[in-house]
């Protein structure tokens, strides 16, 4: 009996070992969580972190409003930290990234309200806003050892084209200078919000890594079928983008875990359409002992 050709033997060994030649290992699935907006003393180290996912904390928020006047007023792109800086300080950022190599930390810009009033995107001019924003955000990113930014303006005193030009040029500069390695946007299904973010997407979508779509802004009682329909519409809106699915652990709406969120995620994963999950927010999840964070990350590593 003749011996097998050595090359054929090696190929059989690789096949049975489950190794595919010419392909790298699949990239870990993405889990993201907003943190620090509500002053509830939550720390990075409180949140369970699965080592086999890519994990992003998103500090909430940096806002271009004054923090020394009452009421706060717009500062034309001069961003200041409004997250819980005592419990989420630069040393805390360094520590969590050192102890968990799969963790990155981003900074969210804007948000919904400050001191019970709406936060508006309100540039004096494109050039002056951009100059101030580049300077202040670069300082915040570097001093806090951050990796990326998230755009979460929800109210606007500027037209969609101005928003697109300001934010798009900011993203371009921060990426070109390697100040940040990734960028996300956080729209939701509201006509003024969508008009601004879709204007940004049309011109600068190629520079945006993730769409943190706020599916928890849909009405309470959303069903799995309705959720899947909402997702399909937003995938069409943000064509070519990685639209992440989401839920809130507060009193917000949308599809909740107890009503089928993870069932929907499993279905999306089987279709190859699950790019990642994000939660609003760690501050609210403390009261549940972060059980939905654990469940989300487990799903991402097993589906």
Image (cartoon, helix red, strand yellow):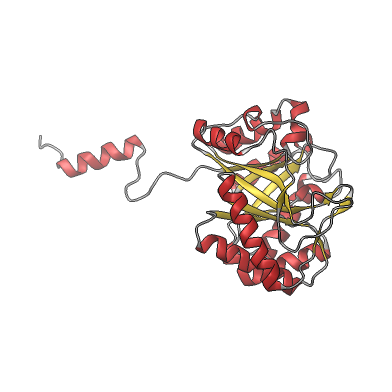
Q: Which residue is depicted at the point 83% across and 49% down?
A: 114
Whether residue 229 is visible:
no
Q: Quadrant of the N terminus?
A: top left
Q: Position of residue 237 (x, y in %)?
A: 70, 65
Give left or right: position of 97 versus 160. Answer: left
Using the image as rendered, state which of residue 225 and residue 111 is in the foreground.
111
- Can you give x and y, in whole percent of width and height, for residue 244 in the image? 65, 50
For image coordinates 82% across by 56% down, the residue present is 119
Q: In which quarter of the image is the C terminus?
A: top right
The residue lying toward the viewer, choosing from 30 and 150, is 150
Instruction: State which quadrant residue 93 falls in.
Output: top right
Left or right of 79 in this view: 29: left
The x, y position of residue 236, in whole percent, is 68, 64
Q: Is residue 126 left or right of residue 272?
A: right
- Tell me where residue 47 sits by quadrant: top right
Q: Residue furthest front?
A: 68
Considering only vertical position in the picture, is 95 above or below 202?
above
């Amino acid at each position: 009996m003749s011996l097998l050709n050595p090359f054929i033997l090696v190929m059989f060994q690789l096949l049975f070992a489950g190794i595919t030649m010419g392909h790298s290992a699949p990239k870990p699935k993405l889990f993201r969580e907003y943190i620090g907006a509500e002053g509830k003393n939550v720390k990075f180290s409180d949140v369970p972190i699965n080592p086999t996912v890519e994990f992003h904390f998103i500090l909430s928020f940096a806002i271009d409003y004054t923090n020394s006047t009452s009421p706060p007023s717009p500062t034309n792109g001069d961003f200041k930290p409004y997250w819980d800086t005592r419990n989420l300080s630069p040393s805390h950022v360094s520590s969590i990234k050192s102890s968990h190599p799969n963790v990155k930390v981003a900074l969210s810009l804007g948000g919904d309200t400050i001191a019970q009033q709406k936060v508006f995107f309100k540039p004096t001019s494109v050039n002056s806003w951009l100059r101030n924003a580049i300077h202040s955000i670069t300082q915040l990113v570097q001093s806090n050892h951050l990796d990326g930014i998230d755009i979460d303006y929800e109210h606007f005193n500027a037209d969609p084209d101005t928003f697109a030009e300001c934010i798009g040029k900011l993203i371009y500069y921060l990426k070109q200078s390697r100040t940040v390695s990734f960028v996300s946007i956080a729209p939701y299904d509201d006509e003024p919000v969508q008009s601004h973010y879709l204007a940004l997407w049309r011109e600068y979508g190629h520079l945006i890594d993730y769409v943190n779509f706020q599916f928890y802004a849909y009405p309470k009682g959303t069903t799995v079928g309705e959720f899947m329909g909402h997702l399909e519409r937003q995938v069409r809106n943000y064509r070519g983008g990685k639209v992440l699915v989401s839920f809130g652990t507060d009193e917000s709406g949308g599809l909740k875990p107890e009503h089928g969120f993870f069932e929907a995620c499993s279905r999306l994963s089987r279709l190859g359409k699950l790019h990642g999950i994000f939660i609003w927010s760690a501050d609210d999840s403390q009261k549940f002992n972060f059980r939905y964070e654990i469940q989300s990350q487990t799903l991402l590593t097993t589906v």
